[in-house]
Amino acid sequence: MQRYFVPSDQFTEHQVTILGDDAHHIQRVMRMNENDKVLCCNDQGQVCLCEITEFTNEGICLTIVEWLKESKELPIQVTIASGLPKGDKLELIIQKATELGAFKFVPFNAARSIVKWDEKKGDKKVERWQKIAKEAAEQSHRNIVPTISKPSSIEELIKISERYDVKVVAFEEEAKQGEQTQFAKMMNEMQPGSSLITVYGPEGGLTDKEVNQLKQHGFISCGLGPRILRAETAPLYVLSAISYHFELQGVK
């Protein structure tokens, strides 16, 4: 069943109004009719089953049939902080990491980032990233759409990290030296409901200076197994491992 994320101000006690691109998708792409049903999610992650009652020039009116008790979210909130990579790699990270349960994305300008952030085009870029996250969240039946911030400096990233329970930086030099325990130890010590921020470098990785700067502010430096992972692969590896540990193994 199709799922749509609808702003809470478009909900009333018994009805939902869907506007814009989503209304076009329902009517022109999915070719739905009155009495067809969809799932609607509000800004609080609540999900309801809705029935289409009317098509208007402004949008689509739906009646709420029932509120559902479901949660498709990871037991811990995982934020992905990626050094800006080349090309459309960040779009891939956002799409796939959303499918795997990421809660938030914080891109940052790393020392080895080849791409430089263009403030003039910045808002449109973030808007595109947010659209990719929304579509991936709908496809994977998430309860929420991850938020994506404008790229920050590493100093701003450190400031953001102060509100997290656990802070990890994936560093390829640790992997090269055979470090394979810190990540597993971190997962074993975390409890459902905790928040985690994980930092990854761009192509070329993070510099020693950046890693030391992060470690001075409470980040744990760790390897991700014996193989060196690409910038777009490492976050997906981490989310997959977290899902296996907390969901498939049934850790409480």
Image (tube, rainbow, N blue to C red):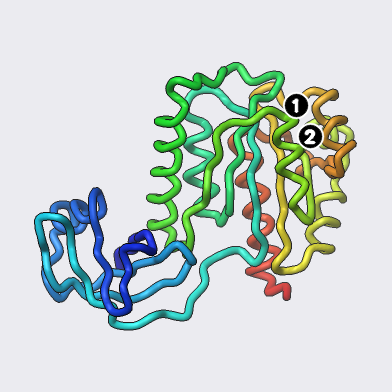
- From the viewer's perspective, is residue 157 above or below residue 237? above
Q: Which structural element holds mark 1?
A: loop
Along the viewing direction, whichever of 250 and 40 lies nearer the viewer: 40
Along the viewing direction, whichever of 152 and 102 lies nearer the viewer: 152
Name the amino acid type tagged 1. Answer: Leu
Residue 28 percent across, percent down from the top left: 13, 52
- From the viewer's perspective, is residue 190 above or below residue 237? below
For this view, does 165 lie left or right of residue 141? right
Q: Residue at x 39, y 64 (%)?
A: 8
Sequence-wise first label, 2 or 1: 2
Residue 98 percent across, percent down from the top left: 51, 51
Quadrant where the C terminus sits is: bottom right
Along the viewing direction, whichever of 22 and 181 lies nearer the viewer: 22
Q: Are marks 2 and 1 in contact (CB under 8 Å)?
A: yes
Graded by Cα atoms within 10 Å as few (under 14), some (14 to 19) or many (20 or more), the crowding at tag 2 reads: many
Name the amino acid type tagged 2. Answer: Phe
Quarter of the figure with residue 188: bottom right
Q: Residue at x 52, y 31 (%)?
A: 89
Per the image, the residue denoted by label 2 is: 171
Give residue 19's mark: none
For this view, does 160 lie left or right of residue 189? left
Residue 50 percent across, percent down from the top left: 27, 74
Is residue 53 shown to the viewer in this render? yes
Residue 109 percent across, percent down from the top left: 64, 25
Q: Residue at x 68, y 35 (%)?
A: 229
- From the viewer's perspective, is residue 163 above or below residue 11? above
For this view, does 37 lie left or right of residue 218? left
Give residue 206's mark: 1
Q: Residue at x 42, y 80 (%)?
A: 68
Mark 2–mark 1 Cα distance, whole angstroms, equals 7 Å
